[in-house]
Image (cartoon, helix red, strand yellow):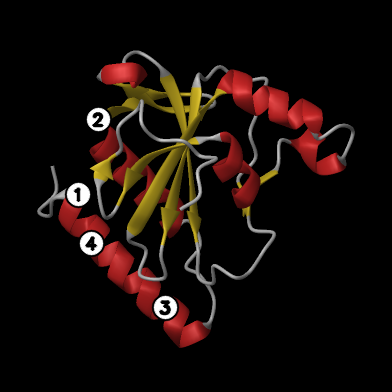
Amino acid sequence: MGVYSVDKLITEARRLAADYRRATGKPLAGVSGEIAQHDAIRLLDLELCNPPIAGCDAIGNSGSRKGKKVQIKGRTIFDEAKTGQRIGQLRMEQEWDLVVLVLLDEELETFEVYEAPREVLKEAMEEGGSSKRAKRGAMSVAKFKIISRLVWTRENGLEDDESWDNQADG
């Protein structure tokens, strides 16, 4: 075990990555994915796969995620008006049950977490037809938000499973 706790290191990584982007105009490669994974595990009671499993980052420990294989995706949203932002590739040939999308703000702090089961994502990709993006497993953040369920917000913490409707005005 190192001298620093993982939580402390993640806090410093957030700060350094945000400072780096302000100084250079470019994101610090790979950092947002690690932060997103750390936050998803902490906020949703997941356990990191150890040893790693192809296509699966974590296993659910409780509730509706218990025993489920979870793929974690992260996306930093610097400008909410900017359209066309994409999540990382979804590999349908690998074994996983859920995809969790962690949205980070410009300070790399998590502000929303969405989740979607494999069946919903597979159906959405098939609806995408023969487009090259759909075949590669690419999906926009906007599309993911539409077909998924909001499971955590900065304001409310864990969202109630039954009461949330992603089609409601709000």
Q: Residue furthest front?
A: 169
Q: Earlier in the sequence, mark 3 or mark 1?
A: 1
- Amino acid on which the number 4 mark rests in the picture: Thr
Assign a secondary structure to mark 1. Answer: helix
Which of 167/126 is in front?
A: 167
Which of 144/137 is in front?
A: 144
Quadrant of the image occupied by residue 105: bottom left
- Residue at 51%, 62% (x, y): give it: 29
The x and y percentages for residue 169 are 50, 49
Q: State left or right for residue 169 relative to residue 65.
A: right
- Around disc 1, counting alpha carbons within 10 Å, would you say few (fewer than 14), some (14 to 19), or many (20 or more)? few
Q: Which residue is mark 1?
A: 6
Assign a secondary structure to mark 3. Answer: helix
The x and y percentages for residue 153 are 32, 49
CA separation in Å, label 4 and label 2? 19 Å
The answer to whether marks 3 and 1 mark residues whose Cβ atoms lie closer than 8 Å is no
The quarter in which the N terminus is drawn is top left
Query: Given this view, does label 4 or label 1 mark the residue nearer the observer?
Result: 4
**Residue 11, disc:** 4
Quadrant of the image occupied by residue 38: top left
The answer to whether marks 4 and 1 mark residues whose Cβ atoms lie closer than 8 Å is no
